[in-house]
Image (cartoon, rainbow, N blue to C red):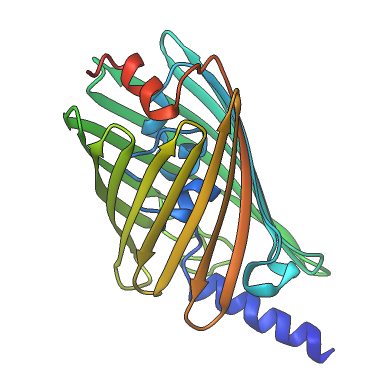
């Protein structure tokens, strides 16, 4: 019983005090600073506008087996994106928790590319909460995102989560409302610097910074840092053929180390991600 109470206490701490990180081992390895980069299928959960930056089909799976050393906090995400002439349609899902407490989410998204300069996206989310012996409930909410190429090498992005301030069980902000904005700069074609400012309306703003370096054709190195909460992140990506295998971990000053991994399958992408995006958008 004591173990269950301890787990529930840490779970509530995680849900109500710490930010809920968006998925993608690649994104987490850059401290989730990628709101203006947003060029893979997991952008569905971070900045859906970025899904219109590429014209190939992608499917991704992400899994974090034991955040802070607790399997009870395991979470997994799946996402799929299909490009069309009129924009990109995407669908995704999430599961989080364990037998006593579980959250699930289904996401449907749309992204539009205007003249290879301005990108806009939106998602509809249905989020459910289930507590053993107490039943379950759910809510709909909406996310919006935008991305602008200021220069060929410089992008500005923004995203708003839970635009309609949906909540459940008469508890304010059970589903957080989060504002995120930032810049991404390609110092080199294979080296990007990313900066973001995230504001959950319940907490102080968090400053996030991350880098991604495609050191060779098949290997990407990433690192990042953020404050409030203070964390350091790092990760690696192995890119071969249609497969991108990503691993990341981050350290939390109070709760320790967390590992996560993911895989993305890209159908129709023949070059590195950065090169393929630039080619599609006619960026020299």
Q: Residue at x 46, y 49 (%)?
A: 27
Q: Quadrant of the C terminus?
A: top left
| Direction bottom: furthest residue | 2
| Quarter of the rendering containing residue 230 | bottom left
Q: Tell me where residue 108 sits by quadrant.
A: top right
Q: Residue at x 53, y 69 (%)?
A: 171
Specify whether residue 63 is in view.
yes
The residue sitting at the front extreme is 216
Tell me if 280 is positioned left or right of 237 in this view: left
The count of marks equals 0
Quarter that holds the N terminus: bottom right
Residue 108 lies left or right of residue 69; in this view the side is left
Asked whether 20 or 122 is in front, the reply is 20
Which residue corresponds to the image point at 28% horizontal and 31% vertical from the top-left?
189
**Residue 22 visible somewhere in the drawing:** no
- Quarter where residue 69 is shown: bottom right
Horizontal and vertical percent position of residue 191:
31, 41
Q: Is residue 124 left or right of residue 161?
A: right
Q: Position of residue 117 (x, y in %)?
A: 22, 23
Out of 18 and 32, give the one closest to the viewer. Answer: 32
**Where is residue 248 shown, x and y percent of the image?**
55, 55
From the viewer's side, name the closer residue of 21 and 283: 283
User: Residue furthest toward the top?
Assistant: 85
Residue drawn 39% across the image and 38% down it: 38
């Amino acid at each position: 019983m004591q173990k269950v109470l301890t787990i529930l206490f840490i779970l509530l701490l995680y849900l109500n005090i710490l930010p809920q990180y968006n998925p993608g081992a690649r994104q987490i390895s850059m401290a989730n600073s990628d709101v203006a980069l947003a060029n893979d299928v997991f952008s569905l959960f971070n900045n859906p506008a970025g899904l219109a930056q590429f014209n190939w089909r992608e499917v991704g799976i992400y899994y974090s087996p034991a955040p802070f050393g607790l399997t009870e906090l395991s979470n997994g995400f799946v996402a799929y994106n299909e490009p069309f002439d009129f924009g990109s349609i995407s669908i995704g899902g999430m599961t989080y928790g364990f037998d006593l407490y579980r959250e699930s989410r289904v996401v449907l998204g749309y992204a539009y590319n205007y003249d290879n300069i301005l990108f806009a996206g939106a998602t509809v989310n249905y989020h459910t909460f289930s507590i053993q012996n107490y039943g379950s409930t759910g809510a709909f909410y909406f996310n919006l995102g935008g991305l602008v190429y200021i220069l060929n090498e410089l992008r500005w992005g923004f995203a708003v989560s839970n635009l309609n301030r949906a909540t459940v069980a008469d508890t304010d902000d059970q589903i957080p409302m989060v504002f995120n904005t930032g810049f991404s700069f390609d110092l080199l074609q294979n080296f990007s610097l990313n900066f973001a400012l995230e504001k959950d309306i319940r907490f102080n703003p968090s400053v996030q910074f991350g880098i991604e370096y495609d050191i060779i054709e098949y290997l990407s190195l990433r690192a990042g840092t953020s404050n409030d909460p203070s964390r350091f992140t790092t990760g690696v990506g192995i890119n071969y053929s249609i497969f991108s295998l990503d691993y990341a971990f981050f350290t939390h000053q109070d709760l320790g180390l967390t590992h996560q991994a993911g895989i993305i399958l890209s159908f129709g992408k023949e070059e590195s991600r950065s090169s393929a995006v630039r080619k599609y958008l006619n960026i020299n």
